[in-house]
Image (cartoon, grey):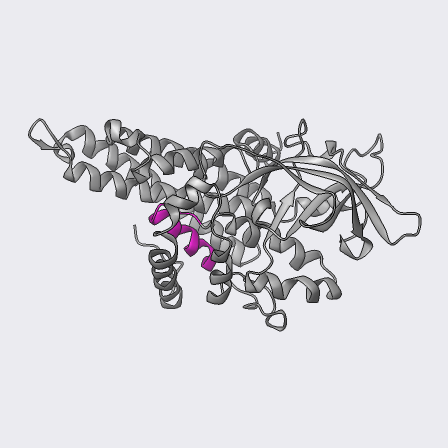
Amino acid sequence: MKRSIYTEEHEAFRAMIRDFIVKEVEPHFAQWEQDNLVDRDLFRKLGALGVMGFDIPEEYGGAGETSYKYQAIITEESARAAVSFGHYSVSTGIVLPYLLNLANEEQKQRWLPGVAAGELMLCVAMTEPGTGSDLAGIRASAKLSDDGTHYVLNGSKTFITGARNSELCIVAARTSPATPENRRHGLSLFVVPTDSEGFAYGRKLEKIGLRSSDTSELAFNEVKVPVENLLGKQDEGFSYLGQNLPRERLSISVGAVSAATAAIRFAKEYVTERQVFGKPVAAFQNTKFVLAECATEVAALQAMVDQGIAFDDAGELTPADAAKIKLFATETAGRVIDKCLQLHGGYGYMLEYPIARLYADTRVNRIYGGTSEVMKTIIAKDLGL
C-alpha cells in the first residue's frame, strides 16, 4: 500500500543513506558480526554525514529540531539491506534524549558537540542482575562525598548495549533509600565516562542475534563521579527513565515492521529463483497464499506504525498508544519472518542468507523496551482494567 508520511526531501535522505550503506557498511558487516562490534570509525563517518545530531541544537553542532522520520528511514534502510549500525539507534534514539531533556547548559556545551560529531557515543546502564524490568529494585549506589565534590559509585549492571563502543554511560543508581510508600524514590542518573577509574567491563554476552553490537556486564568499584555529572535532580531519576519510553517503543516497532518488510522481499526473491519438482517454489499455491497473508499483515502494521510516527511528530504519542504499536508490531513481525524463513526451507536456517539474521535479530523485540506482557499490562490499565 502507498505510504504518505514521507516527502521528496525524505526520499532524498533515504537515497543518501542507502548509498552510505552500500559503500561503508555492507563491505564490512560480516566482519563486524564476527567481532560482535562495529568499527568505531563508523560513528565518526555518520557524524560527518550529519546523522548523529538529530534534535541537537545547531549551536552545539547538531541538526536542530528534526522529525523522527529521518531516524525511521535509517532503520528502514538498514533492515532492507539486512545490516546494522551497531548501537547507533540506542545512542541516538534512546540515550541522547536524556541529555537533550535533562542536561543543564554547561553539560550541553560539554557533551553535545562531541555526540553530534560521532566522537562521543552513548549507552545507558539500568538493568541489574536479578532486577530485570523492576527498575525500582536497582541496588547500585552513588554516595555523595563528605566534601560534596563527587559521588562514589558502586554496583553492577547487565545487558548493557554498546558500552564497549561508548565514551559516556548514563547510569541509574540509588542515592537515597526507598521509602515504604514509594519504592521508586531515591534513584538518580549520572553521566559516567567509560574510561573512569573503577569502571570495568565484565563479560561480553553472547547473544542469539544483533551480533554486530556488543552487550556487556558492567561493574563500578568506587568510581568517582563529579557532582557536575548528575543528570537532572537527585533522587528523581525514576521519573526521568519513563519519559522517553514511548519513542523507544516506537523505534522498536519501526525496526520490527522494517524487518518484516525486508523478509517478504527476501522470501519473494528466493521462491522465484528456487526450483522444486521442476518448477519455482513461487508456483505453488501455498507459497502464494503465505506471502499474500504476510503482505496483508505487514500493510496493516505499516499503517499503524506510520500513524505512531505522525503522533510522535505532533508530540501526541501516548504510552498506551506506543504499547499497542509495539505489541502488534513485534508479534506480527515474529510471525511474518518465521513464515518467510519457512519458505526458504533448510537454507533459511543458514546465516549466509539474510532471512536467518532477520529471524535471530527480531526475536529480542518482544523482550527489550518492555516485554509483550508489560505492553499488555499498560494497555489493560489504559482500558481501566
Going 49% across and 57% down the picture, which residue do you hit?
A: 41
Q: Is residue 179 magenta?
A: no
Q: Is residue 261 left or right of residue 46?
A: left
Give the residue displayed 66% in from the left and 44% down from the top.
242
Q: Give the residues in magenta.
A: 68-84
Asked which quadrant contains residue 176, the reply is top right
Q: Residue 25 or 109: which is nearer the viewer?
A: 25
Percent of width and height locating residue 131: 68, 29
Q: Position of residue 79 (x, y in %)?
A: 38, 47
Please give left or right for residue 305 compared with residue 196 in the image.
left
Location of residue 353 in the rendering, given as x and y in whole percent from the top left corner = 29, 38
Answer above or below: position of 315 versus 223: below
* Residue 93, percent from left and from top: 55, 52
Residue 76 is a magenta residue = yes
Q: Quadrant of residue 268?
A: top left
Q: Is residue 273 visible?
A: yes
Q: Is residue 211 left or right of residue 240?
A: left
Does residue 258 appear in this view?
no
Magenta span: chief secondary structure: helix
Identify the residue at the far right of this view.
146
196 relative position to 60: left or right: right
Which one is nearer the viewer's eye here, 360 or 268? 360
Q: Which part of the image, by quadrant, shows the C terminus?
A: top right
